Image (spheres, rainbow, N blue to C red):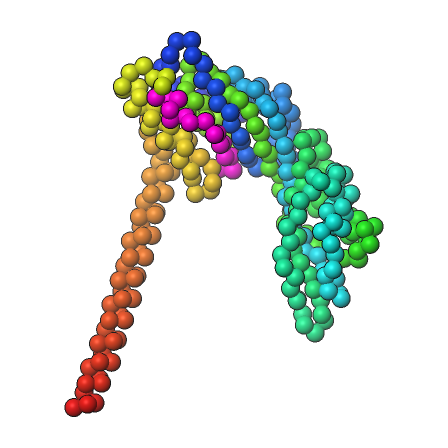
Amino acid sequence: WVGTETTPGTETTTPGATSTVAISVRMNLQPEDLEEFTQDSFKKALGNATGSEVEIESIEFSVQCSYTMSQPDGFSVTYAQVQNAIADSVGVEPEKVSLSASSFRRLSPRRSLASTVVDATILTDSADLVVSIVTNAGNRSLLAAALAKQGASVDVAVDRAPQISAVATARVSSPTESAGSLVQNVQQALSVRYGDSVVVESDEDTSSTLNATTSSASDVESTTSTTLSSLRFSSTGGLIPGQVGSGQEPEAADNSAAVVIAVILVATATLTLALAGLWYRRRRRRSDAEAEVH
């Protein structure tokens, strides 16, 4: 995706002015993607793909996994025991592991077997360490042994294979693109490579930046449409990219709007039929009651 071409925006900016926007990028990754995620390689790839100056501030990886843990006499393992065991088994510090657990539930009243589901998130800023974390986090025997070292004899099952995601914070600059177009360019370039999992966020007021830097009324209208397109969210949680500088709304957004309208119409029709049926039954009961009186 380093060679991905992006269409330049049609708006013109004030001569000598450089647009800079701080962004946060979240995306799901495969193990083979990790070679691109040193700060230097990601900076170069993103700069080439968007035609912008890029300064990477940080990249953090997370590995998410889920376990079912059970004990015959009732689940009594502590948060600290599980946290320390996972950290020990994957090779990170305990504070890099966060947990959330479901409430305890009885699987079989006769056997008095209690278990809980534990969702774990493991953080690291080392791309080199992510692959080994994924491998070890999916090894239930390794985790059971680590729990035993913590004094907890627990049966462990891996409910969900470990999944990788990354969060990168960066500053993107261009002397020719507005802040709104920069956000959209990043979204488009990364979506080509990583699909709908990509979410680009910015705290900048890109609309005001666009209006302040355009040189004519027609440019303002075009770039405002571009900003609205770049900030539209898809049903999968990612931003839907429009055509940079074209002001065209993406086809995916139109399809989503049509689906929403169809759902509303169906719900309205269903409610109408239900109310009509209720009215008819009440009137029938009233007629029957009047007939009995007479």
Q: Is residue 16 left or right of residue 144?
A: left
Q: Is residue 126 visible?
A: yes
Within the image, what quadrant is residue 31 found in? top right
Looking at the image, which residue sits at the far left? 294
Is residue 199 highlighted in magenta?
A: yes
> What residue occupies the far top of the structure in this picture?
16
Residue 190 appears at what percent x and percent y?
Answer: 51, 29
Q: Nearer the viewer, residue 212 or 196?
A: 212
Left or right side of 57 for 111? right
Give the residue at x 73% y 64%: 74
Range shown magenta:
196-211
Instruction: Identify whether 282 is placed above or below 40.
Output: below
Residue ID at (65%, 61%)? 104
Q: Residue 10: say if magenta.
A: no
In the image, taking residue 279 as reference, residue 108 lies left or right, namely: right
Residue 279 at what x, y percent from top left? 24, 71
The x and y percentages for residue 47 are 53, 19
Above-or-below relation of 128 to 272: above
Q: Nearer the viewer, residue 266 or 104?
A: 104
Q: How many marks?
A: 0
Query: Does any portion of residue 2 appear in the rendered image?
Result: no
Q: Is residue 134 above or below residue 170?
A: below
Q: Quadrant of the C terminus?
A: bottom left
Which residue does the image show at 22% across and 84% down from the upper left?
Answer: 288
Q: Position of residue 69 (x, y in %)?
A: 71, 57
Q: Residue at x 54, y 19 (%)?
A: 54
* Vertical order, 169 against 257 (above or below): above
